[in-house]
């Protein structure tokens, strides 16, 4: 039996996937910054982008919770 999820749930899962890719890219960038000895640039970028990443993560978790509630009430 194939379960077809709502478009909102699939959209939220796509956003979560791309957010994970973003975090992976940021982690790779920090590893490269540390390797080349320019960790101070990584700290600067983290101070600028860090709050937005945290806010984005909170919004994504809330969207996922709403999508799960919608899926559970659908049946």
Image (cartoon, grey):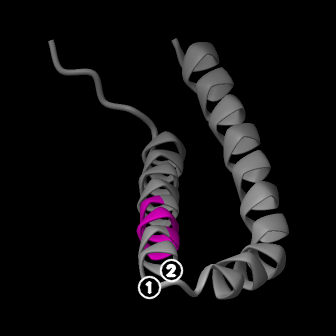
Q: Is residue 26 left or right of residue 63?
A: left
Between 72 and 33, the one lying in front of the other is 33
> Residue 24 in the image: x percent, y percent?
43, 60
Label 2 sits on residue: 33
* Residue at position x 76%, y 39% in the image: 62
Vertical side of 49 occupied by 65: above or below: above
In terms of secondary structure, what is the magenta stretch mainly? helix
The residue lying at 67 percent from left, 48 percent from top is: 60
Q: Is 43 positioned to the left or the right of 5 in the image?
A: right
Q: Is residue 18 magenta?
A: no
Q: Position of residue 67 (x, y in %)?
A: 62, 34
Helix, strand or loop under label 1: loop
Looking at the picture, tell me which residue is in the foreground, 10 or 43: 43
- Residue 74 position by quadrant: top right
**Residue 6 position within the rendered picture, expressed as x and y whole percent measured from the top left:** 45, 38
Q: Which residues fall within the magenta stretch?
A: 24-30
Tag shown at residue 36: 1
- Are there few (<14), some (14-19), or many (20+) residues within 10 Å of tag 1? few
Whether 29 is among the magenta residues is yes
């Amino acid at each position: 039996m194939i379960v077809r999820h709502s478009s909102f749930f699939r959209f939220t899962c796509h956003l979560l996937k791309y957010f994970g890719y973003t975090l992976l890219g940021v982690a790779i960038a920090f590893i490269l910054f540390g390797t080349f000895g320019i960790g101070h640039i990584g700290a600067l970028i983290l101070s600028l982008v860090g709050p937005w990443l945290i806010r984005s993560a909170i919004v994504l978790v809330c969207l996922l919770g709403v999508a799960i509630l919608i899926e559970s009430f659908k049946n």
